[in-house]
Image (cartoon, rainbow, N blue to C red):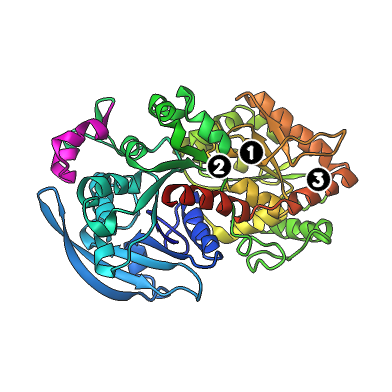
Amino acid sequence: MKILLASSEAAPYIKTGGLGDVAAALPKALCNTPGTEVCIFLPYYKSIKENPKFQLEYLTNFFIPLSWRSVYAGLFRAQSKEGGPVYYFIDNEYYFYRDNAYGYFDDGERFAFFSKAVLEALMHLDWYPDVIHANDWQTALIPVFLQAFYQNLPAYQSIRTLFTIHNMEYQGKAPDSFVDECLGLPDSWKGTMQFDGCTNLMKAAILTADRVSTVSRTYAYEIQNPYYAHGLHNILQEYSYKLSGVVNGIDTEVFNPATDPLIHANFTKKNAAKQKLANKRYLQDKLGLERRDDVPMVAMITRLVGHKGLDLVQAVMDDLMWDDIQLVVIGTGDQQYEDMFRWHASCHPDKMSANIVFDNQLAHQTYASADIMLMPSKQEPCGLTQLIAMRYGTIPVVRETGGLFDTVPAYNPETQEGRGFTFKTYNAHDMLDAIRRAATLYHDTKAWNTLRGIDMDYDSSWAHSVEEYWQIYRSMVD
């Protein structure tokens, strides 16, 4: 089977969040199935173009119609490891030679161009996939353009589309005029494209894709509820027959405490108690925290934005600083949360470290050092942090939502079953209680080591998820 994955980011070339990890790891895992050809299409961003470690091969260029525009598109390729996916890059410096991947007034036009260029590139490669797997609003126009402009071409008629929603909050909204001025779609498409007084790209993809998926089973149910759907619940309920939830995995070669070159001391399940302590002491020294073996280190590695549950943390920060714990925060985001963490760290420098940066090495070192990983999210479609944390023997404390509910069953002290500490209601003191329950168990060395071993044994690889994706792909092409 031939599979094309289209994404606005994929590691190692460009990564701003979890999508970058997923768009790299899933194609790599799919390639393990014999008889499979997989490629990834990305925009050729400035950061990729100027990075000397990325050697790309120029293939060709062509022009594509985008409403009244005729727009240049260059096509580049990166040779992958033998048996791995092939990366293709769509070049247009007007759209992509910018300092950041997102955040511009013309993002809608930029990714409309990218989506159409992906489809147009196929005829120049003379390579036509069985399935195009589009991801989030940036590539939501691929199934739309395929139906509107390419479906009558014989080579395109057998192509099927899967659209994956990684986060319902970002839907690709634009003015009504966007359909005419940028997309060039016939008037008959306006009903498909428009929703709630504007153009909504995600809504259009849900209608036009052959199948729709999201990144956990629980989130697939949640987004049919108004609280989580950001206005699209009726659409998702109507098209629920083609909606599936598939939990993400992680790249267990990259996130492997036994071989990770970024951490202070490598370890396995057998020597985790000793070596995690060595990592913890190293991190305490590095961050200026008091060196103590008897205090649980709680970590948060997250974007500092509201839906990550930071208002809950803010409400009980004084309580947390009163408790006998250490707190390490890594991430950037909203000014109010950055300032809040900086303030408390300055007041309690011996027990809290606020690192308002995106630092991959520090994140790996914290996974290896921390005892508890806090994820109190208001909504969490899947979450990779808890999967990585368990891989490194760090016990998650999570709110029961989305992928957190699917991957972190609540610990039962009587049966010693479960993988972490959970709370259900979006309430700061319920969260605080879960943290305190975890901190209490930390002092029961035998029970803590047992729970840590259970978490490190959990299979967070892509093996199960890939098989579920294969079932979706086959359902479209068989």
In this view, the mark in front (3 or 2): 2
Whole-percent x, y for residue 347 in the image: 63, 39
Please say if the residues under marks 1 and 2 sit with CB atoms less than 8 Å apart: yes
Q: What residue does disc 3 label?
A: 451
Q: Position of residue 18 (x, y in %)?
A: 50, 50
Labelled disc at residue 406:
1
In depth, the one of 461 and 102 nearer the eye is 461
Residue 382: numbered disc: 2
Range drawn in magenta: 179-195
State the SS at label 1: helix
For the residue marked with disc 1, what is the amino acid?
A: Asp
At label 2, which amino acid type do we have? Cys
Query: Where is the N terminus found, in terms of image quarters?
Result: bottom left
Element type at mark 3? helix
Quarter of the image for residue 190 reads top left
Tell me the tag on residue 92: none
Q: Nearer the viewer, mark 1 or mark 3?
A: 1
- Circle nearer the N terminus (3, 2): 2
Residue 182 belongs to magenta span: yes
| Residue 196 seen from this side | yes
* Mark 1 → mark 3, Cα distance in angstroms: 18 Å
CA distance separating discs 1 and 2: 8 Å
Residue 287: tell me if it is visible: no
Instruction: Check if residue 95 falls in the magenta segment.
Output: no
- Residue furthest to the left in view is 68
Residue at (24, 57) in percent of width and height? 154
**Would residue 428 appear left or right of 296 to someone viewing this image?**
left
Q: Residues within 10 Å of mark 1 (few under 14, many from 20)?
A: some
**Left or right relative to 80: residue 354:** right
**What is the crowding at mark 2: few (fewer than 14 residues within 10 Å), some, or many (at least 20)?**
many
- Pick whichever of labels 1 and 2 is earlier in the sequence: 2
